[in-house]
Amino acid sequence: MSRNPVQILTSVFGYPAFRGDQADIIDHIIAKRDALVLMPTGGGKSLCYQIPALCMEGTAIVISPLIALMQNQVETLQQLGIAAAALNSAHSPEEQERVRTAFLNGELKLLYIAPERLFAGGFLDLVSRCEISLFAIDEAHCVSQWGHDFRPEYLRLAVLHEKFPNVPRLALTATADEPTEKDIVERLGLSFGRTFRAGFDRPNICYRLTTKTNGTSQLLNFIKSEHNDDAGIVYCMSRKKVEQVAAKIAATGRIALPYHAGLEPETRQATQARFLKEDAVIIVATIAFGMGIDKPDVRFVAHLDLPKNMESYYQETGRAGRDGLPADAWLAYGLQDVAKLKFLMQNPDKTLARQQLDRTKLESLLQFCESALCRRHLILKYFGEDPPETCGNCDNCLEPADLFDATEAAQMALSCIYRSGEMFGAGHIIDILVGAETEKIRKFGHDRLSTYGMGKGISRPDWQSIFRQLLAHGLLNVDMEGYGGLSLDESCRPVLKGDVTLELKKSPARPKGEKSTARQSRNFANAHEEALFNLLKSVRLTLAKEQNVPPYVIFHDRTLIEMAALKPQSLSAFGELQGVGRSKLEKYGATFLKAIDDGAA
């Protein structure tokens, strides 16, 4: 095999040229230097260690906490004719022994392994007996105590530098703010290496947020109107909600499967396999699902509950559109979501520093939700980039919000909370403001408050929007240990006294994000081209079932789209398609050329 990275890229992986910093990173690793790579999901991180592994002598060890990712990548590499294997608990003892023997005999170019297994059963001693080309540490943010997915076993990876000082180490992640980045460098001992920042932008994802009225109904409408034949992931906070939402989607005739930690491991594994190997499957899950899923054609990620912070939101939405084709990140949220997160932030078991960090991250997330600025601008700025003011591919750019002077309305709300004793939830406070006649108001004598009926000129949905934004701006606190009672934060004093002007977003006539803003993910020149694409998909699915691998391991949708458009008539022309390397040309060229010929006939 050639040791030229460009030749390997074209002949093995079937891509015409490197993207972004890939070539520089690969050259850096081949020169046996350490590096940290920050690159968005779908940006081509795996090539940054796979190609050096093929250029260098020995075996590359890829450390990942994710069994699903290991399996995905091993299947993909084997399709390309590359000697790769994984060593994890999903394999039988016999299979594990076979992999160990192949590794010891120098028969593998890449070996995927979990950090726990790396340090178990004397495996490091086995490593010391083999020739190692490089260590790739995937999901490197797991090493940081400030990260959103801290895993203590990652801290032990610093020993690799001590035991194997001449083996280059490549740490990779798609999610790291500045404190996390510094922590990764320090804890893995990468201070003498180089950091490559490829940027966090995912321009193909359309970010959309909508006010939650009836979340499940809104979700069903979104799926039916925009993604009726697409694979997608729906995230919910609780296991119970996951089960309920999956059942409601399934009742519409779609394949919708629940996934959470309460299910049997065999069930979770079977669910994940169906998602990878079948078309148009929807997974409804807690955050337990999706890490390491390499499925490129997820066309939407929907949240029915707010994620924990911006890192979680970015990582979860990043599971959409890994193939670079248009995809949606859709989120429905309401006042209760904000209150829940405010409560979850109050954890006395955490250190003061951690509580302060959580508070800062939460405030960033809520400001993202309530801001009228470009969503992409806010995401990229959070991760330390200097983005343009608008992107043209988010709800705030496509449907700009109007702002209004909310100082007087905020003063009414704050005064009403104070006068009623700072112990009632938003619903009751709104009842007081609009002058409702309820038993609760009569019981507590709140119809005698000076604020009773003061806000009649503002509709209930508008009041809900105002309270949500007051919470997001940190002017209110919520007591979730009791009954969700609202209280004033010290920071509200300037607004209450009229020393500052407060501008808030107007509540739209309909919830934002309900209208489709997504672009067509597949643009065909004519009906025949679309029919040929569907025929090629069926051929791909048949081949995938025969080999028991996900269809995208054979070819991505992007390759099939190009195939349908260009209609190659020879093996040499077929080999020019993006994603068609030497191995896949030999395996599948004749089969797909016949399908193209049949389609033309």
Image (cartoon, helix red, strand yellow):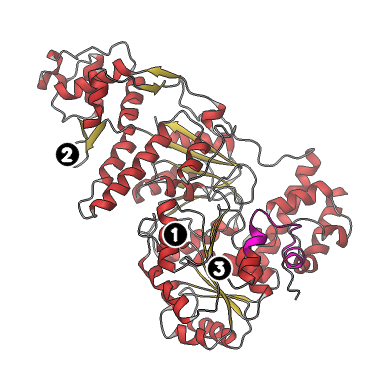
- The segment highlighted magenta reads 6-25
Left or right? Give the position of 247 relative to 547: left
Left or right? Give the position of 493 relative to 576: left
Residue 552 locus on image (x, y percent): 65, 58
Q: Residue at x 46, y 72 (%)?
A: 114
Q: CA distance from mark 3 to mark 1?
A: 21 Å
The residue that disc 3 covers is 71
Does the rendering let one see residue 75? no
- Name the kind of residue labelled 3 in the image: Gln
Residue 478 locus on image (x, y percent): 23, 36
Residue 440 locus on image (x, y percent): 15, 23
Circle 1 packing at 10 Å, graded few (<14), some (14-19), many (20+), is many
Q: Residue at x 77, y 64 (%)?
A: 588
Q: Which mark is residue 141?
A: 1
Residue 5 locus on image (x, y percent): 72, 67
- Name the kind of residue labelled 1 in the image: His
Q: Earlier in the sequence, mark 2 or mark 3?
A: 3
Q: Residue at x 48, y 53 (%)?
A: 175
* Quadrant of the rendered image containing residue 419: top left
Q: Earlier in the sequence, mark 3 or mark 1?
A: 3
Our reading of the magenta stretch's main secondary structure is helix
Q: CA distance from mark 1 to mark 2?
A: 35 Å
- Identify the secondary structure beneath mark 2: loop
Q: Which mark is residue 462?
A: none
Figure check: 38 above or below 404: below
The residue that disc 2 covers is 482
Residue 8 part of the magenta segment: yes
- Identify the secondary structure beneath mark 1: helix
Does the rendering let one see residue 112? yes
- Name the kind of residue labelled 2 in the image: Gly
Residue 133 part of the magenta segment: no
Left or right? Give the position of 221 relative to 563: left
